[in-house]
Image (cartoon, coloured by chain):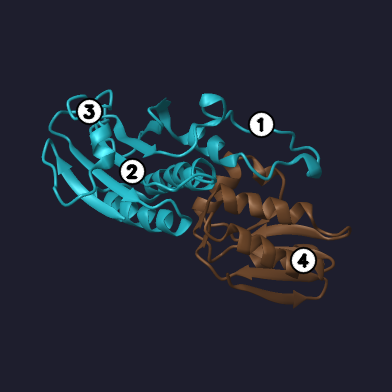
Chain colours: A cyan, B brown
Amino acid sequence: MATQRDPGERRDPDERSDAKKQRDPDTPWEPDAQRDAIVMQVTLDPDLAAVRAALNTIITHLSQDGLDQEELWSVEIVLAEALNNIVLHAYADGPADRIALTWSRGPRGYHFHVMDRGAAMPKGRLPLSNNSNLEHAQTIPEGGFGWFLIRDLARDIDYRRLDGENHLRFRLAVGIVGLAG
Amino acid sequence: MNLVTEKHGQTTIIRVDETRIDAAVAIKFKDRMREITENTQGQIVLDLAHVDFIDSSGLGAIVAVMKQLSQGSSLDLAALSPNVDKVFRLTRMDTVFSIHSSAETAVKAHAG
């Protein structure tokens, strides 16, 4: 796993640059991105232990940004679901490449971009939320909660399949300052 | 995956001595729980006091264990931390389980 601070156009030559070549550095992907915003990136191997470690890194970082416990939890659960989904589904059968998670802070919260080179989402779109019947024990679902949580907590969710890559973008309305009045 | 079992008459408390039930441990958790609950009759209380993070895989594992209980057994939950409680509420799984503020409260509820 590698964490780097990436202000503007600066590129660290030592970093693995494959994922970055795919990004167009001139086009900010966040709707309200500021050109001089700090963009953070973590790249990780697609295994569940690496996801745990990456979450720990990110949450430690965001707690230093002043997010409260509830906000940190909503970031952690949404990222956990998105990243675990890639490990368990997108990279389940194929050769395991990396996962690149990029984020930046904007006036409306934190914008996240998750990229992987695994299998596409079924039917090329995000799964629907699970709204199964809870009345009878045997019909209670054992899965599908992950997308339910992502859809409930994240905003502006966008999924695209581009050139063999999955791009999932979303915003979490946390760490918003100056909302008073 | 550390699970500690405590018998209180007809009620068995299973304490999860882990801070996370996430995708990395969900399968191990489900297997260990299955081993314990297979040989347990009556009320089972899963004490989550030490758990501060659960994700959808962990939640799915708890639901799977509940669905595989033998007849006459039940699975209650106790001592949910705020973050664990939120996952149960958001997914409406709080309507599926009896949830107690602590394992002791759960034991008393079943005794009375």
Q: Are marks 1 and 3 on the same chain?
A: yes
Identity, as a three-letter code, of the amino acid under mark 1:
Asn
Q: Are marks 4 and 3 on the same chain?
A: no
Residue wearing tag 1: A131
| Label ID, residue B32 | none
> Residue B82 appears at what percent x and percent y?
50, 52
Q: In what element is the residue under mark 1?
A: loop
Q: Are marks 2 and 3 on the same chain?
A: yes
Residue wearing tag 3: A24
- Label 1, label 2: how far apart the Cα atoms are: 30 Å
**Is residue B108 visible in the rendered structure shown here?**
no
Residue wearing tag 2: A100
Packing grade of label 2 (10 A; few <14, some 14-19, many >=20) is many
Q: In the current view of this chain or complex, which residue is farthest to the front?
A: A95
Q: Nearer the viewer, residue A154 or A163?
A: A163
Q: Residue at position x 49%, y 59% from top?
A: B52
